[in-house]
């Protein structure tokens, strides 16, 4: 919703708070102030003026001060129509879109363009160089990595112990051998054993009963997918649409 006094737009819930904070002049004493006009870029506004202190007041806002302060207030808050503000915002978004470049290897964007220091530093960074060396099809082409938590688990010591475990030689749930009953009793009180008891098949290694998500289910992968989708939605798709419209 648009504020009836200025160009601010706010939700139905926030608008009353804005009006109270910026436009509540019910307790303001205007004794000694006279009404006069102030011209701001061809538009004339009513203003309150106190000659003795040379102070100006906005009749609908809490703003007050010397001439230059009020002139800037009317210019920024009251001189433009809602349509003019929306048009300027649209131009700003279009310019930002036109200037933005992005890296399809790392899925990061640079709103300040190719001349920005962020852009130059990125392409010389070690992370970018490492991801550039990735071979398509050798792993996750979005994250450009061959690392997979579950595959990594299958090669570590914990899994090898479980693989060679003999039932009755220790904890049959966790598949961990113990030489004496005292150590086994202590194991039963550990988080490792409790996690194994609550393990759900299919969520990791069913043999070791350890949760070990696939790469596609990891937070790192999901974050990279969101970054890629954001770039396609905000930059790639609009440019393709604009290019098609010109043909």
Image (cartoon, rainbow, N blue to C red):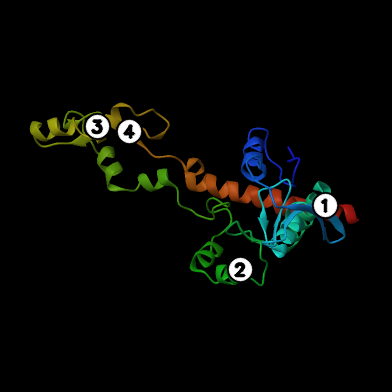
Residue 25 higher or lower than 127, as above or below: above
Mark 3 against mark 4, which lies toward the viewer?
Answer: 3
Q: Quick one: label 1, few (<14), some, or many (20+) residues within 10 Å? A: few
User: In 3D space, how far apart are the residues under numbered discs 3 and 2 (Cα atoms)?
Assistant: 49 Å
Give the side of residue 76 with respect to residue 202, left or right.
right
The residue depicted at 58 percent of the width and 68 percent of the height is: 118
Mark 2 against mark 1, which lies toward the viewer?
Answer: 1
Which quadrant would residue 174 be assigned to in this image?
top left
Q: Which residue is mark 2?
A: 119
Give the side of residue 133 with respect to residue 192, left or right.
right
Residue 33 higher or lower than 14, as above or below: below
Marks 3 and 4 in Cβ contact (< 8 Å)? no
Of residue 26 and residue 8, the one placed in the foreground of this image is: 26
Q: Classify mark 1: helix, strand or loop.
A: helix
Q: Which residue is mark 1?
A: 84
Q: Quick one: label 2, few (<14), some, or many (20+) residues within 10 Å? A: some
Residue 193 tag number:
3
The C terminus sits in image quarter: bottom right
Q: Which residue is mark 4?
A: 209
Q: Earlier in the sequence, mark 3 or mark 4?
A: 3
Percent position (x, y) of residue 29?
A: 65, 46
Count the marks: how many? 4
User: In 3D space, how far apart are the residues under numbered discs 3 and 1 (Cα atoms)?
Assistant: 66 Å
Q: Earlier in the sequence, mark 3 or mark 1?
A: 1
Q: Earlier in the sequence, mark 1 or mark 4?
A: 1
Q: Earlier in the sequence, mark 3 or mark 2?
A: 2
């Amino acid at each position: 919703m648009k504020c009836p006094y200025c160009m601010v737009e706010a939700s139905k819930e926030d608008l009353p708070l804005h009006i109270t904070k910026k436009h509540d002049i019910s307790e303001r004493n205007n004794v000694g102030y006279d009404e006069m006009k102030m011209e701001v870029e061809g538009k004339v506004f009513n203003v309150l003026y106190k000659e003795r202190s040379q102070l100006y007041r906005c009749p609908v806002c809490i703003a007050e001060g010397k001439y230059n302060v009020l002139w800037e207030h009317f210019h920024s808050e009251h001189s433009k129509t809602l349509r003019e503000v929306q048009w300027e915002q649209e131009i700003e978004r279009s310019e930002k879109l036109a200037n933005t470049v992005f890296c399809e290897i790392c899925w990061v964007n640079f709103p300040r363009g190719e001349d920005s220091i962020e852009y130059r530093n990125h392409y010389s960074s070690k992370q970018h160089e490492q991801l550039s060396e990735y071979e398509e099809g050798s792993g996750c082409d979005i994250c450009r990595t061959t690392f997979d938590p579950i595959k990594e688990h299958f090669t570590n010591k914990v899994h090898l112990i479980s693989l060679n475990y003999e039932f009755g030689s220790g904890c049959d749930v966790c598949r961990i051998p113990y030489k004496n009953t005292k150590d086994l009793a202590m194991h039963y009180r550990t988080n490792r054993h409790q996690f194994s008891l609550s393990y759900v098949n299919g969520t990791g290694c069913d043999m070791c009963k350890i949760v070990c998500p696939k790469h596609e289910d990891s937070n790192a992968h999901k974050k990279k997918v969101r970054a890629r989708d954001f770039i396609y939605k905000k930059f790639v798709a609009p440019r393709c649409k604009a290019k098609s419209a010109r043909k």
